[in-house]
C-alpha cells in the first residue's frame, strides 16, 4: 500500500486512492453479502496497469467501502461528488441529427446499457446459486418479449465452438472475461450461467452474466443512432417490466444511477458506439487528444483493449455518470461527426474543424 502515486512504467499516471488511512479504515469491513476490501481491490493488485482496478461484489460495496469508491468515482467521472444526483433521460425524440448522414464512414451503430438486479450479487461477488437465479429470472422474462424484441436465449454452456467463434467475430457475443475480470473473480464457474439472447435480426441482444448480470444491446448497420436508441429504450422498459413481475427491481439509486460491478459503468451504464472508418484521423498524432476533447473513447474493432483494423475505430461516449443517456448519445453523434469532418479536411488538405483547433 502506498500513500501517493509514484511514477511506474506499468501504472498509468493517476492518483492512488487506496491510501494507508483509507486501507486502515476499511480493511476489516464486510458487506452483508460477505464481500471484502481485499476482493474489491484484487484486480488492481494483480494488474498494476489497471486504469481503475476496483470492482464491487454487491450494491452495498459502494457504501461500506464508500471512502474508496467515492474517491475513484470522483476521479474517473470528472469530479462527480458524493452529494451529486444522477438523472436519467431515455427520450429518443430529443436526439438531434444522425451520425454520418451521407452514409460514407460509419459501418454500424451499437448502444448498450448494463443492468443488475437488487439483492443478487454483482459478478465478482455473486454465488453460483445467485448467478443461476439471475439466468433463470432473466431468461424467463426475455421469453415473454413481443414483436421485434422477441427472440431466443442461447446458453454458452453447450454452444458449439464454431457458433461461439462466429458470434464473437460478428461482434454479437462476449469473450471470457479478460485478466482484469479474472482477478476480480467475475469468471468463476465459466461458462455456467452465461449466455446470449437475440432477436432474429440480431438487432436486439441481451448478454447474461458477463461483467454485469445484464448487458442490454441494440445495434444495426449504418449510423441511425436514433433508431438504435429507440429500440434499446423499448427493450430496457420491456425487461424492467418482466423483472418487476418477478417481484424484483434493478439495483439503482439517485446518486449512482444504475449500479454496476465496475465503478466506471455506474450511472447510465451506457456506451453508444459506432464502428467508423477514419484512416487519416486515426493515424494522426493528435487522435487521442481530439477524442478526449470531444469526450469520446476510442477502442479497436474487437472491443475493449483491442486494436484498430484497416483504419476502422470503435468510438463511443467516455462518460457514463452525471449526464443523461440522451446527452451521452448526443455527445457521440456530435463528436463522431466532427471527426468525420476532420477526415474529409485531412483528405482534401483543408483546415480542421474549429472544435479541434
Ligand atoms: P462493451 O461495449 O460491452 O463495453 P466491448 O467494447 O468489448 O464491450 O465490445 C463488445 C463487442 O461489441 C465487440 O465485439 C465490439 O466489436 C462490438 N461493438 C462495439 N461497438 C460496435 C458497433 N458500433 N458496431 C458493431 N459492433 C460493435
Ligand atoms: N478494471 C479495468 C481497469 O481498471 C477495466 C476498467 C473499465 N473497463 C471495464 N470493462 N469495466 O483498467
Image: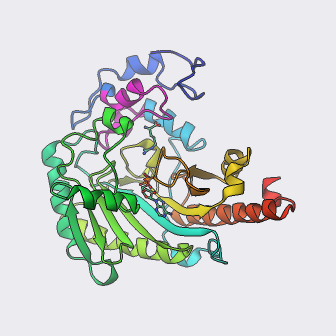
Coordinates of residue 229 in the picture (x, y in percent): 48, 72
50 magenta-colored: yes
Residue lying at the far bottom in this picture: please name it: 147
Q: Is residue 196 left or right of residue 4?
A: left
200 magenta-colored: no
Decide if residue 329 is in sight here: yes
Part of the protein shown in magenta: 39-67
Q: Nearer the viewer, residue 135 or 178?
A: 178
The residue at 31%/40% (across/down) is: 60
Q: Nearer the viewer, residue 351 or 2?
A: 351
Coordinates of residue 208 in the picture (x, y in percent): 27, 57
Decide if residue 63 is in sight here: no
Q: How is the image coloured?
A: rainbow
Quadrant, the N terminus: top left
Coordinates of residue 138 in the picture (x, y in percent): 22, 63
The residue at 63%/68% (across/down) is: 105
Is 104 drawn above or below residue 215 in the view shown? Answer: below
Is 158 drawn above or below residue 11 in the view shown? Answer: below
Coordinates of residue 79 in the picture (x, y in percent): 60, 41
Q: Nearer the viewer, residue 308 or 124?
A: 308
Residue 163 figure quarter: bottom left
Residue 157 figure quarter: bottom left
The residue at 32%/64% (across/down) is: 206
Amino acid at each position: 500500500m502506498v500513500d501517493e502515486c509514484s511514477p511506474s512504467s506499468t501504472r498509468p499516471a493517476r492518483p492512488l486512492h487506496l491510501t494507508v488511512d483509507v486501507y486502515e479504515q476499511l480493511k476489516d469491513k464486510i458487506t452483508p453479502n460477505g464481500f471484502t476490501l481485499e476482493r474489491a481491490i484484487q484486480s488492481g493488485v494483480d494488474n498494476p496497469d489497471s486504469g481503475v482496478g476496483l470492482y464491487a461484489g454487491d450494491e452495498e460495496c459502494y457504501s461500506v467501502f464508500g471512502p474508496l469508491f467515492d474517491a475513484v468515482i470522483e476521479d474517473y467521472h470528472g469530479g462527480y461528488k458524493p452529494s451529486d444526483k444522477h438523472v436519467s433521460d431515455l427520450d429518443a425524440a430529443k436526439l438531434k441529427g444522425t451520425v454520418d448522414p451521407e452514409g460514407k464512414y460509419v459501418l454500424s451503430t451499437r448502444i448498450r446499457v448494463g443492468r443488475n438486479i437488487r439483492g443478487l450479487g454483482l459478478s465478482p461477488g455473486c454465488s453460483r446459486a445467485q448467478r443461476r437465479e439471475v439466468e433463470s429470472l432473466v431468461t424467463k422474462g426475455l421469453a415473454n418479449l413481443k414483436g421485434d424484441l422477441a427472440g431466443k436465449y442461447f446458453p454458452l454452456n453447450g454452444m458449439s465452438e464454431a457458433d461461439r467463434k462466429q458470434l464473437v467475430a460478428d461482434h454479437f457475443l462476449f469473450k471470457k472475461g479478460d485478466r482484469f475480470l479474472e482477478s476480480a473473480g467475475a469468471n468463476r464457474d465459466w461458462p455456467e450461467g452465461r449466455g446470449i439472447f437475440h432477436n432474429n435480426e440480431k438487432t436486439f441482444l441481451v448478454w447474461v452474466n458477463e461483467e454485469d448480470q445484464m448487458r442490454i444491446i441494440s445495434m444495426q448497420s449504418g449510423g441511425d443512432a436514433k433508431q438504435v436508441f429507440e429500440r434499446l429504450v423499448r427493450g430496457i422498459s420491456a425487461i424492467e417490466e418482466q423483472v418487476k413481475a418477478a417481484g424484483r427491481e434493478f439495483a439503482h439509486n439517485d446518486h449512482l444511477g444504475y449500479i454496476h460491478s465496475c465503478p466506471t459503468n455506474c450511472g447510465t451504464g451506457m456506451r453508444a458506439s459506432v464502428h467508423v472508418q477514419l484512416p487519416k484521423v486515426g493515424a494522426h498524432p493528435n487522435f487521442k487528444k481530439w477524442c478526449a476533447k470531444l469526450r469520446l473513447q476510442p477502442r479497436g474493432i474487437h472491443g475493449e483493449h483491442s486494436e484498430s483494423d484497416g483504419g476502422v475505430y470503435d468510438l463511443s461516449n467516455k462518460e457514463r455518470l452525471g449526464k443523461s443517456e440522451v446527452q451521452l448519445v448526443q455527445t457521440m453523434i456530435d463528436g463522431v461527426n466532427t471527426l468525420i469532418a476532420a477526415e474529409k479536411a485531412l483528405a482534401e488538405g483543408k483546415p480542421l474543424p474549429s472544435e479541434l483547433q
